[in-house]
Structure formats: C-alpha cells, structure tokens
Image: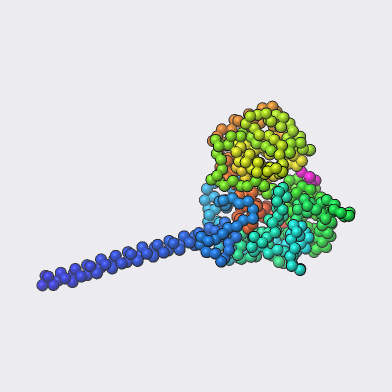
Amino acid sequence: MSEKNRLPSRFFFYLITISMLLLILSFVFLLQVSTASFRSVFKLILHNGTSFYLNPTLEGDDIELPLLSSSISQVTAERPIWRGESASINSNSTMEMATSGRQRMMGCDPTRSRLRVYMYDLPPEFHFGLMGWKGRENQTWPNVENPSQIPPYPGGLNLQHSVEYWITLDLLSSDIPTIVRPCTAIRVKNSSQADVIFVPFFASLSYNRHSKLHGEEKVSVNKMLQGKLVHYLMGRHEWKKHGGKDHLIVAHHPNSMLDARKKLGSAIFVLADFGRYPVQIANLEKDVIAPYRHVVTTIPSDKSATFAERPTLLYFRGAIYRKDGGVTRQELYYLLKDEKDVVFAFGSVQRNGIRRASHGMASSKFCLNIAGDTPSSNRLFDAIASHCVPVIISDEIELPFEDVLDYSEFCIFVRASDAVKKGYLLNILRGIKENKWTKMWERLKKIVHHFEYQYPTHPGDAVDMIWEQVSHRISSIRFKHHKKSRYNRS
C-alpha cells in the first residue's frame, strides 16, 4: 500500500514542477517581447519629441532626419531656467519632448496652443518670390512637406538675418500632420480666431538683394514693396481693428523697413537690436529681439575643445574700422594686436573667411563681441555655436530671451570705457581660472540650441523661443486693452 501511495505523490510533484517551469518560461518570454515593444515605442516618441521631420514610409532604424540648417548632432530640448530656479527642472525635458511629440502627431489643438497666428496670404513677390521661387499659377506658397523641395535661403551673410524665413516655414508647416514640431504657435485660417497677425514680408532679404536701382528703375524693388505693403495693411480690417498693435513684422536687418517703419510702428517688430530705431518706433515694451542666425557650424558637445585644448586666449576677426560705437574696436586693436595669445585681425566672408573664423573661435577660450555700426553683431552667436565664451563690449546691446536666460552664466561683460584701459581686459581674462571657464563652457553647451534656426522647428530653439516672446508681448497688449476698456461697455 505504501508503494502505491508514493506513485501518485511523485506524479503530482513532477506535474507541479513542470507546470511552474513552463509558467516561468512564459513569463520571461512575455517580458522580453514587452520590453522590445516598449523600446520601439519609446524610440519613436523620442524622435517625435525632438521635432525632426519624419518620413511616414520609413520604419525603425531607416528613419532619416534631414535638417535645412547647420545642425547640431544632439538636440537637447532643455527648457529655459528662470533665474533662481533649480537646475533639476531640466530632468523633465525628455518627458516634455515626448509629450510634445505625441501631441503633434495627433495634431495641435489651436485652443491649447500658446499662440494662434493668422498669416496674410501675400503674393510671392513679398516672400519666396524674392529668392527666385516661382510656383504654379495662383500658387502663393511652396510645398513645405518635403524639406528637400523648399526654396533655400541665399547663403553667405544673407543668412544671419533670415529670421523671417524660418518663422514663415514654421507657420506653413503647422497644419501638416507628417511634420513634427512644437505646438507653441499654430496657424489659423480665420483672423477673428487669432491672437496675432503675421505679415510674411522678407524685409531683410528685400533690403540685401533689392535695395539698389537696376537699369532704368527710379524706385528700388525694396522701396516699392514697402510702399505696397503699407497700402495693403492700411486697407485691412485686421489692422484697423487694433491699429496694427497685434501685427507681427520681422525687420531683422537694421536697414530693412526704413521707408515703412514709421507708418507701421505700432506693430510688434522682430529686430536684431534698437541701434537704428527711435524709441517711439521700437522698444522692449512691445518688440522682440531675435538672435542672428550664426554662419559658423555648430560644434557638437562631445567634439568641443576643453580649456587646455584651446591655445588662443582671445579671438576677434572682422571689420576693425567702423563708425558709431565701432571706435572701441580701433582702440582695442592697437592695444591687443601684438599680444602673443591674442588673435585680433581683419577678416571678411571672402577667401574662406567663415571657415577661418569657425576654426579660430573653436580653438579660443574667449571671443570678443564689440559694438560696430550697431550694438549687436552675428559674432556673438558664432561664438556661442563654437562654445567660445563671449566677451561682450557693447554698452547699448539688447540680448535675445534675456528674461529667461542669464547671460552672465556664459558671457563676460565689460564696459567700453573700461575695456580701452591698458591692461584692463587682459587682466580680467587671464584671471579667470580653468574651473570657472569650464563652468561657463558647460553652460554654453546646454543653451546653444536656443540659438538654432532650423526646419522643422524644435522645442526650445530660436523660432520656438521667439514665439514665446511674442506671446508675452501679446499678453501685455491684451492687458492694456482690457484695462483701458473697463468703463467703455458700462
């Protein structure tokens, strides 16, 4: 009897053991499948979150990420830190990117976007036609769904004032579901639904390429277009409604819009600085300062030279004899030109000038940004892209996004009156030790993406930051309008 009782017990023991083993193996298999699926989904979310253009016909590792701008190898969607705010906030940036990507793939909700923007359908002669683009009959805009087919902006120094181009591209792409971008600004087709009215006039390009008379012309194309634009806007009910205060006009080149700016001065201007504008027409209360589009190539963070790998202490290459505030350049040139660890030389875009400047900045610890004909210059943003700590000698300069970026964390500021004192500037720079310089260098690498113009727009890049600034101005305008209207309705 005992032997018979043992047999069923052993049978059940083996059956339970085999069942447990099968259960464990099944659990491991399911875990591997789930992990692989999670990784694929997470990878797609990260791609979407970085706001690259995605080709929906490609899958997995075959996804291509073309950019129209000089790209940085790793795009960091770091949210700007307010002064006094903990840096640990940035640990949530990946999640913010992923959320942004998922939202955009489902389409931006105009009611939840920071800005609803109505863009006038101006004829091509005001925008892409200035670059030689010709669409089909009655075609106002180029197809921006495929980046490789978008008319390229003219190169060289034209690029530094191309802000108007990138903003227009961003709005044109805002209702294309295959293009992933932030939902900060969304284009609406009805002006009554808009927070801001965008005027797509490529004013900087118009000045750069069409301000001179040709042939038997008595009026330049640039001046003619400004006249036509003023006539057009003055006849629109959108302009009349608020006197143009909710209109956005990009006039980044300091000489653009010279003929029309007085009549259109109530609008929000996107400018490089206020150097050539009277305060009644342009000021920080209503206007936005935007960064130049740098012309040197952005250095990837992992390729950036360290303190010891940068043999030049201080670097400047550019025009030395300038008018207005540029007198400081001449004085500094004579003070610094013979210093062995300083490069202070004349340079231009000709004869590989951009390549030489790129190499010079990338191998220098500090890069001079001195006022010239105007308080600002592209040199500051070339330095930032090169992770060369900027030394700003320009007392009247206004800096982009300074309400959210503390420039003292990655720039050195010196008053012009002090800079021209013998030995003053070099004593300051030679007194900055490696650990302090490295801290500023690390900060440069973290904020560089805020100064990148690219298509499609990325979270926290230059275009996205400009839209944030416009949003602040619109809020201020709305506040003043509501306050003024307190007793009107009653």
**276 in the magenta segment:** yes
The location of residue 325, given as percent across then percent down, is 76, 37
Asked which quadrant contains residue 438, the reply is top right
Query: Left of 24 or right of it: where is 65?
Result: right
- The residue lying toward the viewer, choosing from 208 and 473, is 208
Residue shown at 60%/38% (left/top)? 363
Question: Relative to residue 426, is residue 209 depicted above or below?
Answer: below
Among the 4 quarters of the image, the one containing residue 412: top right
Residue lying furthest front in this view? 351
Residue furthest left in the image: 1
Could you say where residue 188 lies in the image, as x and y percent from the top left? 69, 65
Question: Foreground residue, 190 or 205?
Answer: 205
Q: Residue at x 57, y 65 (%)?
A: 56
198 sits to left or right of 92: right
Identify which residue is drawn at 74% across, 61% down: 133
The secondary structure making up most of the magenta span is loop
- Seen from the viewer's position, the closer of residues 428 and 467 is 428
Q: Is residue 423 visible?
A: yes
Q: What segment carries the magenta color?
A: 275-279
The spot of residue 340 in percent (x, y) is: 63, 29
